Image (cartoon, grey):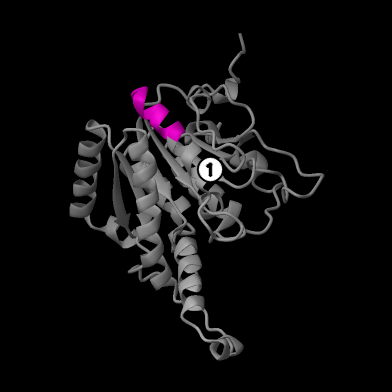
Amino acid sequence: METVDSTRAFVKNVKRVIVKVGTAVVTRADGRLALGRLGALCEQLQDLNSQGYEVILVTSGAVGVGRQRLRYRKLLNSSFLDLQKPQTELDGKACAAVGQNGLMALYDSLFSQLDVTSAQLLVTDNDFRDPDFRRQLNDTVNSLLSLKVIPIFNENDAISTRRAPYEDSSGIFWDNDSLAALLALELKADLLVLLSDVEGLYSGPPRDPDSKLIHTYIKETHERVITFGDKSRVGRGGMTAKVKAAMYAAYAGIPVVITSSVEDAQVNVRYLTGAERENAVIESAFKLIL
């Protein structure tokens, strides 16, 4: 019988788990939806749901999906002469509005095939400044989870007023990683899982042969020895943003896992028992202080 890594022992008694998937996971390199990965992801979440876990999904990808669709529509409606002119960049807000519709339609279809009901919740960071909103958010999510419905969150990019730079006054980079961390605190999650297009947290850029996979990140040990690479091909913040968001949750005592779902979208129960070794875990605040 495999012995659970002692540094993972705090990942236990998990009931409520928040899983965040980035744009690089949701979409392929050409901007289209990654149907295979999303299908596998939904199967994993359905499995956890059926085992009694309370599953909350935070998804990115609406802007990327919308941009791909609008580019295709623009191409169909353009003459040969139009195509010779300089092409203007599509409005990101419009892309978000179009893409969110298609993204949620796909999630609804995939979960329906698995006899699971999902619900859409769109929020912005400004919403969390309203105490009435936060109370209603908790009431709504708790009601959905009691019915075994999987809430699916995304930032409401179509009407969000946040502009670059995306780092707030506290130094937290605002993207869906930050949203997932904020929801983990607000909804009192037992575990936060951040799925990316890399295997986990490395000591340097993942493509650097000298970079090493860090299995357990402790701020005092690793903060000054890690060199972050570029952000993902389509996301907003990259690994730097993930670690900042993870630390935000970890200091509140919520364990965090950063791992890849590009290959097989595995979000299985090994993460909840602490037995999986090939991913990075951000220690809780208590362990960080030790």
Residue 67 position (above or below residue 144): below
How many residues crowd mark 1 within 10 Å: few (<14), some (14–19), many (20+)? many
Q: Quadrant of the C terminus?
A: top right
Pick whichever, 92 or 214, lies toward us.
Answer: 92
Magenta range is 43-53
Q: Is residue 20 left or right of residue 228?
A: left
Q: Is residue 273 left or right of residue 1?
A: left
Q: Amino acid at mark 1?
A: Arg
Locate residue 41, reporting x and y percent: 48, 38
In the rendered picture of this protein, how many numbered marks are placed on residues?
A: 1
Pick whichever, 147 or 159, lies toward us.
Answer: 147
Residue 157, quarter of the rendered image? bottom left
Q: Residue at x 31, y 62 (%)?
A: 126
Q: Is residue 250 visible?
A: no
Q: Residue furthest top?
A: 1
Does the stretch in magenta take in 50? yes
Pick whichever, 149 or 208, lies toward us.
Answer: 149
Locate residue 177, reporting x and y percent: 47, 51
Q: Is residue 25 visible?
A: yes
- Specify the principal SS of the magenta part: helix
Judged from the image, the secondary structure of the residue bearing numbered disc 1 is: helix
Q: Residue at x 81, y 45 (%)?
A: 209
For disc 1, the marked residue is 37
Does the stretch in magenta take in 39? no
Q: Residue at x 61, y 57 (%)?
A: 29
Residue 146 position (above or below residue 260): above
Residue 2 position (above or below residue 211): above
Q: Is residue 70 left or right of residue 139?
A: right
Q: Residue at x 81, y 44 (%)?
A: 210
Locate residue 49, reporting x and y percent: 36, 29
Q: Quadrant of the N terminus?
A: top right
Q: Is residue 29 left or right of residue 148?
A: right
